[in-house]
Amino acid sequence: MSAPHRYSLMMRAIHWLMAIAILGLIASGWFMAGLDKSVDYKYDIYPWHKSFGVLILFLLVLRIVIRLFSKIPPLPSTMPKIEKGLAHLGHTLLYLLMFLVPASGYLMSAAAPGREVAMFGWVLPNLVEKDKELASLLHDIHEVIPYVLLGVIAVHLLAVIKHRMFDHPDHDSLKRML
Ligand code: HEM
Ligand code: HEM
């Protein structure tokens, strides 16, 4: 059987679903954290951010399972080795951050004294001891790495534009994901 030219429907669906959710989470996190404590709806946004944030962890597990059972279209044989290497490196970094960003958010909230983490009202088990210092460290991490993820997403987008507009038509990666 010949190799596929694009990602499977399931891979494409979960890529775009997670892309929208993650960009929305970065925007909502930035927005809600920047609001003054006196703004009355500030803490109405937090449970939604946390719920969709934890959902990303479940979707990531599902995505990895789908990927294991999907045929991945090979990169064009004419693509320079260095570009293939960079693509793999970039995608690996995206997968790593798709785990680390929500994991740090969940652990930060789980470690914070007097709080429980819920996902759309369903209270989740606390996987860590309550510890103010740990919560504060995780808070510092969760304040920074979503923006590192945003930076990697920007490079990802630039790479897609480069391959579509300034490259051989066979190297158009967007066709593989549409
Ligand atoms: C992919 C998933 C996630 C993304 C992209 C994301 C992104 C962000 C961003 C950009 C901020 C603002 C940081 C700042 O400027 O200070 C933020 C704040 C926050 N996030 Fe997330 N987050 C995710 C998952 C989670 C999860 C799973 C939780 C908890 C269960 C969580 C809890 C929080 C809380 C409580 C804040 C506010 C911290 C503060 O008030 O200073 N996040 N998030
Ligand atoms: C914002 C617009 C986005 C566009 C236009 C876009 C486009 C693409 C395209 C065309 C590919 C296929 C690359 C290939 O040829 O193999 C791809 C793969 C990928 N994208 Fe995106 N993407 C976007 C957002 C995101 C976001 C937000 C994330 C996650 C944070 C993400 C994570 C990934 C990953 C991990 C792969 C590799 C898939 C795999 O082989 O498992 N993308 N993307």
Image: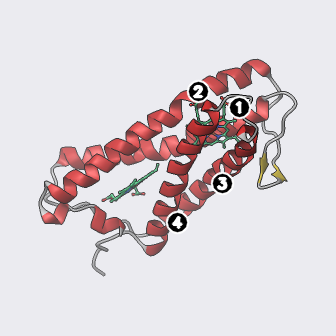
For mark 2, what is the residue?
141
Q: Earlier in the sequence, mark 1 or mark 3?
A: 3
- Crowd class of label 1 (few under 14; some 14 to 19; many from 20; radius 10 Å): many
Q: Residue at x 27, y 47 (%)?
A: 158
Q: Earlier in the sequence, mark 4 or mark 3?
A: 3
Please report contact status of discs 2 and 1: CB closer than 8 Å, yes or no. yes
Q: Residue at x 71, y 38 (%)?
A: 42
What kind of element bears circle 2? helix
Instruction: Name the side, left or right, on which 88 lies relative to 101.
Output: left
For mark 1, what is the residue?
108
Q: Position of residue 65 (x, y in %)?
A: 56, 62
Q: Earlier in the sequence, mark 4 or mark 2?
A: 4
Which quadrant of the figure contains the C terminus? Answer: bottom left
Q: Position of residue 52 (x, y in %)?
A: 65, 52
Point out which mark residue 55 bears: 3
Query: Label 4, label 2: how many angstroms apart (C-alpha)?
Result: 29 Å
Query: Label 1, label 3: how many angstroms apart (C-alpha)?
Result: 16 Å
In the depicted structure, whether residue 7 falls above or below residue 135: below
Q: Residue at x 79, y 43 (%)?
A: 117
For mark 4, what is the residue?
66
Colour scheme:
secondary structure
